[in-house]
Image: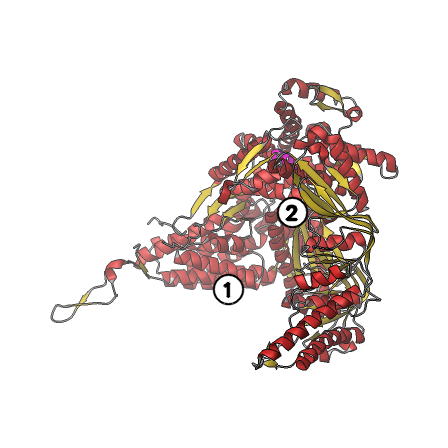
Amino acid sequence: MPIDKIFKDDASEEKGERARMASFVGAMAISDLVKSTLGPKGMDKILQSTGRGHAVTVTNDGATILKSLHIDNPAAKVLVDISKVQDDEVGDGTTSVVVLAGELLREAEKLVASKIHPMTIIAGYRMASECARNALLKRVIDNKDNAEKFRSDLLKIAMTTLCSKILSQDKEHFAEMAVDAVFRLKGSTNLEAIQIIKKPGGSLKDSFLDEGFILDKKIGIGQPKRIENANILVANTAMDTDKVKIYGARVRVDSMTKVAEIEGAEKEKMKDKVKKIIGHGINCFVNRQLIYNFPEELFADAGILAIEHADFEGIERLGLVTGGEIASTFDNPESVKLGHCKLIEEIMIGEDKLIHFSGCEMGQACSIVLRGASHHVLDEAERSLHDALCVLSQTVNDTRVLLGGGWPEMVMAKEVDELARKTAGKKSHAIEAFSRALVAIPTTIADNAGLDSAELVAQLRAEHHTEGCNAGIDVITGAVGDMEERGIYEAFKVKQAVLLSATEASEMILRVDEIITCAPRRREDRM
Amino acid sequence: MALAFDEFGRPFIILREQDQKTRLRGIDAQKANIAAGKAVARILRSSLGPKGMDKMLQGPDGDITITNDGATILEQMDVDNQIAKLMVELSRSQDYEIGDGTTGVVVMAGALLEQAERQLDRGIHPIRIAEGYEMASRVAVEHLERIAQKFEFDVNNYEPLVQTCMTTLSSKIVNRCKRSLAEIAVKAVLAVADLERRDVNLDLIKVEGKVGGKLEDTELIYGILIDKDMSHPQMPKQIEDAHIAILTCPFEPPKPKTKHKVDIDTVEKFETLRKQEQQYFDEMVQKCKDVGATLVICQWGFDDEANHLLMHRNLPAVRWVGGVELELIAIATGGRIVPRFQELTPEKLGKAGVVREKSFGTTKERMLYIEHCANSKAVTVFIRGGNKMMIEETKRSIHDALCVARNLIRNKSIVYGGGAAEIACSLAVDAAADKYPGVEQYAIRAFAEALDSVPMALAENSGLQPIETLSAVKSQQIKENIPFYGIDCNDVGTNDMREQNVFETLIGKQQQILLATQVVKMILKIDDVISNSEY
């Protein structure tokens, strides 16, 4: 008596070899997809959204590409997930992590085909990844104590990160900008304090870092356009009609005169409020909510600059920059901390008017104004800059750095290779495979640059045989070169995260021997 | 089909719309049911043991789960067959009751069904088989009791507990750092355990996960972790020696439950109402301040004005904290949950040594740590990991480990793992079989054979020769009369599970056998399946 099925309709089940095959193929497809964006000569992808307007994104940021894909293969989803986590955690290396995981699985597929059990492969991979990490730890450079050198390290890291992006033309300019911005944060990883404003027009070179704070808002009519030595009150309060918040209150009147009286009282209340605000001795008032015409006029009369409808982030940043607290009640002006800055003025960037706060008390926050030819360029520039900022802010906390250009991969591959030779048993095949997967990254970088990867990697491997070698692939000249001289640096934290999450993900996929797909949830037919 | 005629030859209708139903009766029904049960067990079989493989499950919304936890696999599998659903229930009840061994119980049930099929072919009545199984299970459970060993441990010497948890964790993907995770689980359980009453309330252990970092960063926090931040961005991020007011009333004007209306008809009333409103906010904040609170944790939201007043009076506050978390905080800090501002008193405040906000990664996610609580009876296991699936799987593994530790505290007895207990039981049942006269004898033997299938699956998954290994271990157990020999899954080189430190809890094993027998009995007793045929 054959059992027909134990699953619901539409649900499917794949077992053993087939399941493994499905996940290998899926994972490799994803890694091949983003592979061509790796390295300084990587290409970009155009993503067209299916949403309204078919918005187009041009990017070579791995996480952005993968985020926008609609994927059905479960293993591929695992890779998408690791790249997303990499983005959240360290900000860069989103492509590398997927490529490495893909290569590890490609190697694993070969081993499985030659009848080595996945569990053995996992055991080997684990040993190898531990060994690779230790190899990196041995070779890290740490210039924590030497502020000047550390700064130049950061600069080099920023340039290395940026050189694979659209900003590579002006990478010195942007690297300088990013390092300055991150140093202002003084060790905090809160990138919120760095505001990126995109304004189309001009060229990328015209982008600049502003020490102050720029608010993309307009100054109310008839109010001063320029204030020196400003006392700022940052507020989050209703300046339209102040509702009575006690539940169930409502106005009920029996004659027109009463209406007028109540209206008068309301107006009086608002006037009172404004008076109290003015009583703080301020000359600038920034509110998160709307400011209606009436209070605005009152502010104008008092010569106070009032800015309405600054959104939540704007308020928080402004509070951070000027050192003022965000106020919602105004009854005790003595104890409310006001924000201060030297100068508030309206400035023009391109065609837009913005409000510029300069000479602020607390220098943590700053603004970066990006200029560029089109929205696509600006969006991509923002992503690239964000990557660089993330990496830098992480590096400030974990000051260890490594050389770049395929150097860390070669160092790891060499150590792992040596481990393979020492290990007895089938595991050594897996360890060897791990080292091959590591080498695939410099190979891809070279391939993407149109260089003879086999020749270059072989040369590199030979160079690395000598102790303490700094050789890596110099894509610009197309030859093997000393990475320290060329100033190509990478953050240790990024490399470590790439290594660990790629191993973890490939391990996870390897352990699977069965895929069960549930029936997709039925959409309600609205026909 | 069921069709009957009365004395005039007119048909009765017994089943409504019988054309649209399919019906299986007698031996066919049992066979079909057994086949379905076996199919489910077959899926799980490869997940058993330290070298077991994982399953990847794609949910109806395309979300992915990767796990080798039996209960989770079955839960997500979305089965349609009734018997398969019974198996799902089986592993779920093992999960609720014991928390671990959810895969083993299904494999066991599958093996029992397979054996039952063979007995059915011999023409033994299903009820007799069921009865035989029942007797055999009793023998097995008693035997387990005999071979079980008591473990001595106390708060300072928890090594045996750690070892047992490690056995549980070794079959999961987290086995890379099973030692540290097992220690975390044991410490967590010990922290909340009531050793006098031998009871552990697992609700006091909160398991939180956050993507990022690596598995090694997983930590145990003696306190509470809540996924919230301070209500006002400029409130202090760290509070030493906090006195916590735990409120379930919002910082908002009161909303009486009875319907009412406040009519404003004169300017004076408008003015008084306005004053009252201001006063109201002021009073609320002042009340908290007066009792000496330095941190307010509230279940509800704050009005903008209240928020600022709190900030202004230097009283940090957290809003929108969930009910469960609120309870945990109250337990941990020794505070009381206060439903009304009027009832706030200094005694009702909770106390914690440090409350601090911590941010993670490049996104602006923050979490609030409440540590060094007055009454450290609530702990949090904070899991980090490379990706979402990893975190989820680690959560499940930690849950299993916590359950195992709890079971050990309840009942100190352990049996040896690696199939050793099953083999010992199988030998005992086999020996007992001969004493029973009648058909049941065959069923009891079949039960013994079914018990062998767990070590067999273990050996198979570890890449060993199943039959060869099993028979070798079996003969070793008989020869030396020691029930500690099991399958050497990790290729350590010894069969002695005492040396390998592979333990399982006695109640876990007993429950596995009892639950599996029960479900199999139930399945065997079904002789008629009526189901709606496909449209």
Specify the subunit that label 1 lies on.
B
Magenta stretch secondary structure, dominant: helix
The residue that appears at 67% across and 79% down in the rendered structure is B267
Task: Respond whether the residues carrying marks 1 and 2 are from the same subunit.
Answer: yes
Residue at the extreme left of the image, as rendered = B8
**B74 part of magenta stretch:** no
Residue hosting label 2? B175
> Closer to the camera, B49 or B388?
B388
Q: Tell me which label, 1 or 2, sits earlier in the chain.
A: 1
The residue that mark 1 highlights is B138
- Residue A49 x %, y %: 52, 41
**Crowd band around label 2 with a 10 angstrom C-alpha radius: few (<14), some (14–19), many (20+):** some
Instruction: Give the residues drawn in magenta, as a range.
Output: A92-101
* Residue drawn at the location 33% of the way across and 50% of the way down: A1
Extreme-right residue of the structure:
A146
Q: Where is residue A309 in the image (x, y as percent from the top left)?
A: 67, 56
